[in-house]
Image: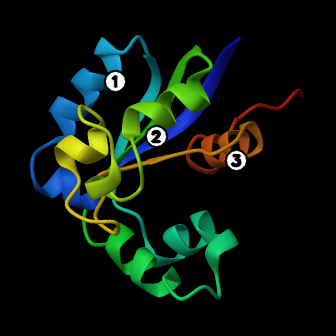
Amino acid sequence: MIEQTLAIIKPDAMAAGYADAIIKQILNNGFNIIQKEEINLSKEEAEGFYAEHKGRSFFDELVEFMISGPVTVMVLEKDNAILAWRDLMGATDPAQAAEGTIRKLFGASKGNNASHGSDSATSAAREIDYFFPKTCCSH
């Protein structure tokens, strides 16, 4: 089934110059990039995006990290895109990630792990709409 998912190249990977290599991996693995934008998140945007984690011990550190530099946000599409992107990213901790995955190749630590991906169809819909809201109205 064709799905869409949100992918983010995080500030650590952007600062290290890995964005092009990550995008190449995405394309080489059969994803279509439907939308793509490089942005600098405000504190409010990062807090809103990660609102489900508010109150958890890592929340403030995560927000600070995500506003530390530019990110690339993308809508990816292919068969079973959500699971396929999570598989391509690898485990959250690069040390535990499989060889050849984005986090193994480009991540430095559990916190600086190069990429984000939606974890479910519900999350994908919310996350895509967060960065690429549908602008439509019938008059």
Mark yes or no: residue 70 visible. no
Tell me: 20 left or right of 55.
left
Q: Residue at x 54, y 39 (%)?
A: 6
Q: Are marks 2 and 1 in contact (CB under 8 Å)?
A: yes
**SS for dot 1:** helix
Crowding near the residue tagged with mark 1, few <14, some 14–19, many ≥20 C-alpha atoms within 10 Å? some
**SS for dot 3:** helix
Crowding near the residue tagged with mark 2, few <14, some 14–19, many ≥20 C-alpha atoms within 10 Å? many
Q: Which amino acid does label 1 sit on?
A: Ile
Q: What residue type is labelled 2?
A: Ala
Crowding near the residue tagged with mark 3, few <14, some 14–19, many ≥20 C-alpha atoms within 10 Å? some
Q: Position of residue 10 (x, y in %)?
A: 32, 55
Q: Which badge, 2 or 1, is on the more N-terminal residue?
A: 2
Residue that numbered label 2 is attached to: 7
Q: Do the residues labelled 1 and 3 touch (CB within 8 Å)?
A: no
Measure how far apart labels 2 and 1 are at the Cα level: 10 Å
Q: Quadrant of residue 111?
A: bottom left
Q: Position of residue 77 (x, y in %)?
A: 54, 19
Q: Which badge, 2 or 3, is on the more N-terminal residue?
A: 2
Q: In this view, does 129 lie above or below 40?
A: above
